[in-house]
Amino acid sequence: MPDQKRIAHIDMDAFFASCELSVYPELRGLPMVVGGRRSDSPRFRPDGTRDFVRLREYVGRGVLTTATYEARALGVHSAMPTMKAAKIAPDAILLPVSFDLYRKYSRLFKEAVRSVSPVVQDIGIDEVYADVSFLEEESEAIARRLKSAVVEATGGLTCSVGIAPNKLLAKLSSDMQKPDGFTILTMEDLPTKVWPLAASKVNGIGPKASAKLSSLGITTIGDVAIREKVWLEENFGRNYGAWLHQVSHGLDDRPVVTYRKPVVMSRETTFERNLRAVHDREELGATFTRLCDQVATDLERKGYIARKIGIKIRFDDFRTVTRDITLPTPLSEAKAIRHAAGQCLKRVDLSRPIRLLGVKVSGLVRPGKDDQGDGPTQFDLTFL
DNA sequence: TCTGGGGTCCTAGGACCC
DNA sequence: TCTGGGGTCCTAGGACCC
């Protein structure tokens, strides 16, 4: 067994769009985006062909979930407001989000990866890490085997693979030959292949940190690497600064974790139009109850009860507030969640129009089993 | 051109306890 | 009586990711 760690990062190519293309193969090669509502589903014409909705017909507040490479070439991309995308690419085909379909392909994709290497960490619906250290083959052979297993299991969906000594570098490398490619990275490649990359390519360096870095004249990962650790800590705080120093030198010791207990479950919705607390009281109340019901269902389905109940409100000006409460005993019933969430709602000034309403539960424990953790509270020691 | 929904993790102040 | 420091919990907000 080689003592050098090898981690693979496997990332599906334009995943949601690719799933849709296997349902609607006639759209192959056309600019297409996913992000519509159910009403944007294609209809059958009398002659049996399908009539697809165009992006220009969209009305609403959604954002694109994904776009085919042909649509990306026109300048639209995932997370773009759909109304904005409609101005840029009005003739692109629009499809509604079909999560059940994506979950089906996601299962097939992950099973395929596990068939090559069983130590797999879920990152999202279309992305995993796999620890492939124990495999005997060369990294290139592993990458090819992962890719063909995925294509075979999903009936033709492609992915991009990166294999490197750790998660950080694996993730960066899977992005280097997209779509349908693979990249093997070693520590020796750091100066030539990693340092030239934009700092924002690193997982954990988002828009805020990037802006601050560039205001200090830092744009690439290499620019970060030439800074002293103390300088980074002075400018970005002790934790984040030390972390920046680490990642810029390609260092990352996070293991591949195959199971994690969930931390929070939430449901939220953005209204078609902003609602007012007084005038739209009924609609708000009905939505609030529905969200609580959904969270309760989620809790029950996954087998948890929750000690913390919270709400989230986004106003018309996009300002977001949260309120939450810790209960003396964990619970999962919809009515009790609704009551606790209602108490939270009372603590918010609702004079502005409301854009979004959400309900969240956390402090999750499994009912019956050690729900107070390992504290002495579950034992009666008074007899001592 | 106004910005989804589901998450994780971190920070920071105040309460409270030792 | 005053002071100090550490640890943990609670709450609110925010950065970031897919």
Image (cartoon, coloured by chain):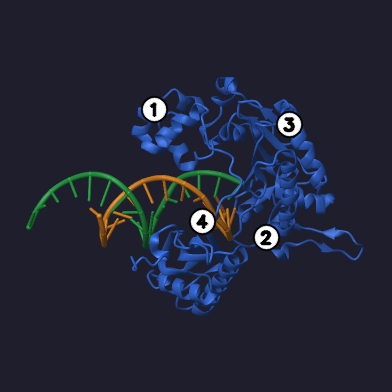
Chain colours: A blue, B orange, C green
Residue linked to disc 4: A263
Query: Is label 1 in a helix, a strand or a loop?
Result: helix
Residue A92, relative to residue A248: is it above or below? below
State which chain disc 2 sits on: A
The tag on residue A58 is 2
- Using the numbered discs, state the Cα–Cα distance from disc 3 to disc 2 in whole angstroms: 43 Å
The tag on residue A142 is 3
Mark nearer the N terminus (4 vs 1): 1
Q: Name which residue type carries label 4.
A: Val
Q: Mark 2 or mark 4, which is nearer to you?
A: 4
State which chain disc 3 sits on: A
Q: Mark 1 or mark 3, which is nearer to you?
A: 3
Q: Name which residue type carries label 2.
A: Tyr
Residue A98 falls left or right of residue A49: left
Query: Is label 2 in a helix, a strand or a loop?
Result: loop
Q: Name which residue type carries label 1.
A: Lys
Question: Badges 2 and 4: C-beta atoms under 8 Å apart?
Answer: no
Mark nearer the N terminus (2 vs 4): 2
Question: Badges 2 and 1: C-beta atoms under 8 Å apart?
Answer: no
Q: Are marks 1 and 3 on the same chain?
A: yes
- Using the numbered discs, state the Cα–Cα distance from disc 1 to disc 3 in whole angstroms: 36 Å
- Using the numbered discs, state the Cα–Cα distance from disc 4 to disc 3 in whole angstroms: 33 Å
- Residue at the spot 63% in from the left edge and 48% down from the top edge: A124
Mark nearer the N terminus (4 vs 3): 3
The tag on residue A229 is 1
Q: Is residue A324 visible?
A: no
Question: Badges 1 and 3: C-beta atoms under 8 Å apart?
Answer: no
Residue A257 falls left or right of residue A381: right
Query: Is label 4 in a helix, a strand or a loop?
Result: loop
